[in-house]
Each structure stands twice: as C-alpha cells, then as structure tokens.
Image (spheres, grey):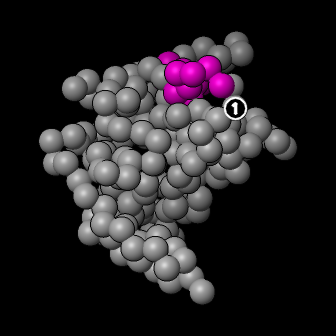
C-alpha cells in the first residue's frame, strides 16, 4: 500500500512505508529569478526558484507564474546566459545557455534519478490552470555548488526522460530561463 509522507521541508512524495526527515543546511541556498525568453531576448520576470541543499539532495522550491498550464521539461543548462543565440541558422530563445549540464559527458537524457544520464535533468515542472507553479521538487544527485554559474530552463513541452521518440524528452522550445548566481 502506498501512502503520502510529508517531510519536514514540506515535500510530499508517495512512498511505501518509508519515513525519513529531510534536513536542510540553510547556508547552502540560492535564489534564481526566472524570466520569459524568446528569440527576441529576455523578457519579464515571472517569479523565482529557490535552491536548497538537504541531506537527500537539492530541494527546488518553485514560485513561478504566467506559464502555460501542464507539464514542462525543466533542466540545468551549461552556461549562465539566457540570451538568444543563433542555432541552425536562426535566432533561438535562450540558446546562449547551451545544452543540458552534463559534466561527465554521458550524452544521455535519462532523468533526474538515473546515475547514467545528464546531471542537468530535473524533475518535470507542473503548472496549474492559473499558470502557476508553486511546489517543491527533489533532485537527489545535485547540490547548490554544482549549479552555480549555470542556467535553469523551462521548456514548452513535457519531458519523458528519453531521447526517443523525440530528442531530449520532447521538451521543445525554451520559454523561461534564470541564471543561477555564482557562490
């Protein structure tokens, strides 16, 4: 039987009889302002994402609005730049951020829980019918220090954590981006 466990950091995850506190070290946090992005440039701020180290990985607290409802791919990208750049001969939203953060050069888009894939693969981001995303996610393989000087990216489509049938999980266009501050 599955039941919901609420950890002390406020994350609710379905678990099978498992209880464990999620402890945080308040010194290891970062706040990221997220803006809309397009091929014309960086747009208005749509909220913040707070990153916090815990004993069980990185807790990502979302405070975003004005996004299309539904599931969206959510990733850490290599470069701290949300500007458009030329890609395949045309200006592309937030292309200056580069690709998914993959320091071990795995080349594999396998999701946040698979040790053989990109470290930049985060849990998918859910946006409610009002265009808001205000929940917490857990990325167990990451720490705030790993992400300093990189970018957080929200994609137009969802993410199936595979390169099949579409590359990079089918996330499609980049619609929002935020630069993670250096420590």
Provide residue 152's location: percent of width, then percent of height.
Answer: 43, 36
Q: Give the range drawn in magenta.
A: 92-106
What x and y, as percent, mark residue 125? Answer: 51, 55
Q: In this view, does 143 lie to the left or right of 124?
A: left
> How far across and how far down the image is residue 15, in percent?
51, 74
Is residue 75 in view? yes
**Pointer 1 local density, CA inside 10 Å: few below 14, some 14–19, many at least 20:** some
For image coordinates 77% across by 38% down, the residue present is 163
Residue tagged 1 = 108
What residue lies at 31% left-to-right and 61% top-to-bottom?
22
Which quarter of the rendered picture does the C terminus lie within?
top left
Q: Main secondary structure of the magenta part?
A: loop
Q: How many labels does the image show?
A: 1
Q: Of helix, strand and loop, which one carries label 1?
A: loop
In the picture shown, does residue 15 fall above or below 94?
below
Q: Looking at the picture, tell me which residue is in the foreground, 92 or 170.
A: 170
Which residue is drawn at the image coordinates 65% and 17% (left, top)?
87
Residue 97 lies, with reference to residue 57, above or below; the image says above
Q: Which residue is drawn at 74% across and 43% down?
A: 162
| Quadrant of the rendering where the N terminus is positioned | bottom right
Q: Within the image, what quadrant is residue 81 found in?
A: top left
**Is residue 80 placed above or below 120 in the rendered structure?**
above
**Residue 93 magenta-drawn?**
yes
Q: Judge from the rendering whether residue 120 lies leftward or rightward of residue 65; answer left or right.
A: right
């Amino acid at each position: 039987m599955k039941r919901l466990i609420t950890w002390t950091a406020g994350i609710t995850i379905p678990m099978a009889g498992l209880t464990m506190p999620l402890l945080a070290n308040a010194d290891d946090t970062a706040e990221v302002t997220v803006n809309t992005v397009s091929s014309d440039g960086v747009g208005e701020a749509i909220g913040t994402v707070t990153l916090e180290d815990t004993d069980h990985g990185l807790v990502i607290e979302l405070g975003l609005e004005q996004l299309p409802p539904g599931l969206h791919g959510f990733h850490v990208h290599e470069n701290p730049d949300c500007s458009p750049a030329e890609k395949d001969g045309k200006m592309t939203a937030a292309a200056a951020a580069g690709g998914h953060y993959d320091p071990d050069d795995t080349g594999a888009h396998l999701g946040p829980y698979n040790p053989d894939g990109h470290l930049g693969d985060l849990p998918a981001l859910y946006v409610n019918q009002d265009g808001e995303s205000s929940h917490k996610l857990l990325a167990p393989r990451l720490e705030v220090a790993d992400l300093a000087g990189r970018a957080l990216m929200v994609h137009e489509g969802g993410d199936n954590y595979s390169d099949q049938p579409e590359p990079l999980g089918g996330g499609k266009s980049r619609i929002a981006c935020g630069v993670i501050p250096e420590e």
